[in-house]
Amino acid sequence: MSFLFHPLWRSSLLHSFHNPSKIITRNATSAQKKTDSMDPKLSIIRRALYPPNIKHSATPTGSWRPNTMRALWKAIPDKQAHYTIERAFKLHLRHKRQRREAELERKFDSMRNAMVELARIDLPLAQEANRQVDHRIRTEAEVNMLSTLRGAQKTLAKAKIEGRIRGLFPRELKIPTDTPPREGWNHDWKPPVAHTV
Amino acid sequence: MASKASTSLLSPVESPETPHHDERKYFIQTAILLNRSPTLSHPPTSFEAAYYEYNAKIGRALFNPFPYQFYFKSGSVLKSQFNKEERLRDKEAFNWAKKPRRGKHNAELKSGKTLHPAKDSSNEETEEQIKAPVPLDEPPKISAGGSTIAISGMMAKEEEEEIMSRTTDADLRKDVKSLDRKGHRNLYLLIKRGKGLPDWTLPGAQGGLRYGELLHEAAERELYADCGVNIDAWIVGRHPIGYMDDRLPSTLQSTGQYAGCKTFFFKAHIMAGQVDPTTGSLADFAWMTKSEVRKAVKPEYWTNIRDIMSDF
């Protein structure tokens, strides 16, 4: 929060405090005439975008909480303390990042060592693991399996193949939420199509 | 680090570090690291929570006023309710000293209306709107920067939505078989076999590869053989994530054909379902976090599996 660059802070150096008499306002009567003839919805939107009292500041809508400086000084202890808090948080983020990156590096090294070892003891298996497969085409096994099926079974088998595409993350892998689902984890899940090895 | 940049998973055989091919025969088998990814967002530390609260206060002081006329119909109950709660939040944030107001304004204030609606101290809430997740150990408290519970109370009444607690029933019961426990952490499946050594291990590593079978195919087969078919699982790619030097199965130990046994680990995600212990004749199974796994498994086994798991 670099509030020290906020135009309000800067302008406070020029004006000692917010004096209502220095607030520049639009002509009240002309504004009233305009809003009377306008659709109330439009006037509400206009008032939300352009508040009636505007200050001499860089922001077009202006920040016109009347006791901003007072509120600010209540929020922060003092300038030095604010900077210390900012630096402490940035340091905390850096430590977090370093821990995360170190863990990723350990995982990658473990994978790399496993592949090196596999190549050493069984080269064909390692080469198969490294093979770049075109995931858009159906495998021979899938084609053969589908040719033997008919009707509803075939539809289900097709749905199963197209529901889980090799090489892509499954859509059931959800992003974490702030609170758990109402029903919780589905412990009673059964495969819609009978699993075949 | 130059050597690390030159090597990649895609071409280990071309890397300069690869030792010469080992002519001895090894017994290769696969084991699975079945992972339930976090379902809940990571809770902020007390420092992070304090920092967010601090910034919420600064935001409240600086931000443009909340355009309440745009969101609430004039004269509606919801608007007056919002304004009331907003003044409360403002008071909580800044601890304004009470200034007695004189005259007719006093009565209007008491009734809940405001004299100057445009000057109402309703500022835009950004950080406070996003409910900061409460750490699991601490009970929920109203933050000074702005009471999110006030928002949820009002909105919840309007929408009649029940917000579930981050601490689930499974957490309170400490049910290690439940997948609802520890939503913010990664859980890993450990199993105990009935026969021989009753150690906690990862599933798989039973019998090795079939003729013509590839490593990831063997991993998938072993996964369903041990855990049952009632799991919606997905094995990540064709590459193993780690390996260990294991003991040969008892049936093969006497024959001299194998120089040793290597177990390759594969990562899998579970999206739904539960393990069926009868399929693989398991004595017990449990879903544990990385720190719990460390306490449960043998130390030699731990050194092999610690680098493939996530700390969180």
Image (tube, coloured by chain):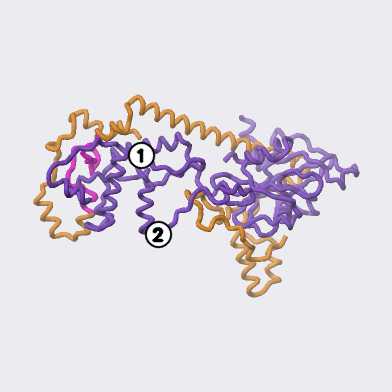
Q: Earlier in the sequence, mark 1 or mark 2?
A: 1
Q: Which quadrant of the structure image shows residue A140?
A: bottom right
Question: Is residue A64 magenta-colored?
Answer: yes
The residue under the point 69% across, 36% down is B15
Residue B308 x/y as whole percent:
65, 40
Q: Which residues are magenta?
A: A45-69
Label of residue B160 in the image: 2
Residue A149 x/y as whole percent:
68, 72
Chain on which label 2 sits: B
**Mark 1 vs mark 2, CA separation in Å:** 26 Å
Callout 1 crowding tier (Cα within 10 Å): few <14, some 14–19, many ≥20: some
Quadrant in which the N terminus of chain B appears: top right
Decide if residue A39 is on the left or right side of residue B236.
left
Q: What's the amino acid at mark 2? A: Glu
Q: Which residue is mark 1?
A: B144
The front one of A88 and A100 is A88
| Magenta-drawn stretch, dominant element (helix, strand or loop) | loop
Residue B62 x/y as whole percent:
28, 38
Quadrant in which the C terminus of chain B appears: top right
Chain on which label 1 sits: B
User: Disc 2 on helix, strand or loop?
Assistant: loop
- Chain identifier, colour purple: B
- Up-down relation of residue B273 to residue A143 (above or below): above
Callout 2 crowding tier (Cα within 10 Å): few <14, some 14–19, many ≥20: few
- Chain identifier, colour orange: A
Q: What's the amino acid at mark 1? A: Ala
